[in-house]
Amino acid sequence: MKTDSSPDLGAAASALDEADPLRSMRDRFVGSESSIVYFDGNSLGRPPRASVERLARFATEEWGGRLIRGWDESWMQLPFTIGDEIGRTAIGAAAGQTVVGDSTTVLLYKLIRAAFDAQKALDPTRVEIVVDRDNFPTDRYLVDGIARERGGRVRWIDVDLSAGVTAESLSSVVGPETAVVVLSQVAYRSGHLADAPELTRIAQDAGALVMWDLCHSAGSVPVEADDWGFDLAVGCTYKYLNGGPGSPAFAYVAKRHQETLAQPIQGWMGTADVFAMGPEYRPAEGMRRFLSGTPPIVGMLAMQDTLAMIDEVGIDAIREKSVSLTEFAIAVTDATLAPLGVTVASPRDAVFRGGHITLSHPAMRAVTARLWAEDVIPDYRDPHGLRIGLSPLSTSFAETLAGLRSVADALRAELA
Ligand SMILES: *Cc1c(COP(=O)(O)O)cnc(C)c1O
């Protein structure tokens, strides 16, 4: 049985695409001409067309032509120049506080551990790391490991899986023993958008340092790291920043903490004079000290094209489109999927919602397998969650409607 192809929804999608000031951006991505519906740009963004050319040019001209001279000519500085670009266009950080380095996991480890050690050194009773039970697995596993390794304790926040950490839930766990608080701005499962300025204030009022995980927010929701008083932040570049599979993460360290934090992987690239190759490690001043080994230059190429797009249209326009995409997806869900028993496991109020929504039904694992086989690509997250990622620069309203209609068809087939 085919889904209802309600003309109202079709007309609404066309009207929204027509009125969308960012509609032309979609054509700048590889694959936008195909009929694939892509609901996973929040997990692995599509490649910008400009990046295809940039990668080819890099291989032939820079790598192939400049060879090892490339390090002196530009590559040594790339982690910092791109870091500053991320700071300026996507996370509200003045220059000199953002660097592109290792994976998200490794940067989180280095900075959470450094923050924990610094706090404990100031006050040996501050030994708790606060994290919520629904934070991304890597964040939870790291916190558990760091607490054990450094003589600390984990303090868990219980959260509603369809929502996220609130001011009340954070206030009830922080106190004189809190060393570090680790939070995601946008929850990977529900898409809940945390009140980052408020939660930062609550943690800092208790004397804690805060680490913000920006993986699901950088490039899709506004972040004002400096104005909101962030201490530390780490984020992915292969999600909304379209850096490609495994592209390296970025780290933000507020200027006031840079000289006091000592990160644990003291490699040669983080030293004050890299090519002095001296007898011992002396950490560089500024953000260089948070690097460890040779920076992954090839992985830093593609993200520059998305940063240029963000600069061109502005993060506020991206957020506006993102809100309207998720509003539309929820309206389509209510009209076509709710009658099949699907519920929305994400905040309904856009103020508390990031760039993706999760749709819940016990058959969603099987539905996901059917959809992938038909070139409709969401992802699945336990329990029963079909995650619909709507990347504002590369997703259209028509694509959103087509994909959700396919979800309804697949669910009907599964239930038949
Ligand atoms: C995607 C994601 C990660 C991934 O970390 P990697 O080291 O890149 O695998 C970490 N944290 C959050 C919140 C994420 O969404």
Image (tube, rainbow, N blue to C red):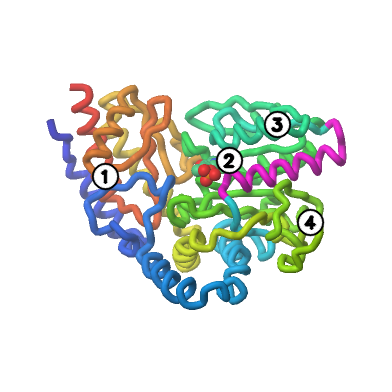
Query: What's the residue at 37%, 37% (across, down)?
Result: 379
Considering only order in the chain, which callout, 4 or 3, is on the residue closer to the N terminus?
3
Cα separation, mark 2 vs mark 3, equals 16 Å
| Residue 88 visible, this angle | no
Question: Tag 1's secondary structure?
Answer: helix
State left or right for residue 148 relative to residue 348. right
> What kind of residue is marked 2?
Ser
Does residue 105 show up magenta in the picture? yes
| Depth order, front residue of 153/401 | 153
Main secondary-structure element of the magenta-colored stretch: helix
Is the residue indicated by label 4 positioned so its CB lies within 8 Å of ligand 1?
A: no
Cα separation, mark 1 vs mark 2, equals 29 Å
State left or right for residue 208 relative to residue 235. right
Cα separation, mark 3 vs mark 4, equals 40 Å
Q: Mark 1 — residue? A: 401
Is the residue indicated by label 2 positioned so its CB lies within 8 Å of ligand 1?
A: yes
Q: Is the C-beta separation of discs 1 and 2 under 8 Å? A: no
Disc 1 residue crowd, few under 14, some 14–19, many 20+, Cα 10 Å: many
Coordinates of residue 101 in the picture (x, y in percent): 60, 55
> What kind of residue is marked 4?
Tyr
Considering only order in the chain, which callout, 3 or 2, is on the residue closer to the N terminus?
3
Residue 227 position (above or below residue 330): below
Q: Mark 4 — residue? A: 281
Query: What's the residue at 62%, 39% (across, down)?
Result: 183
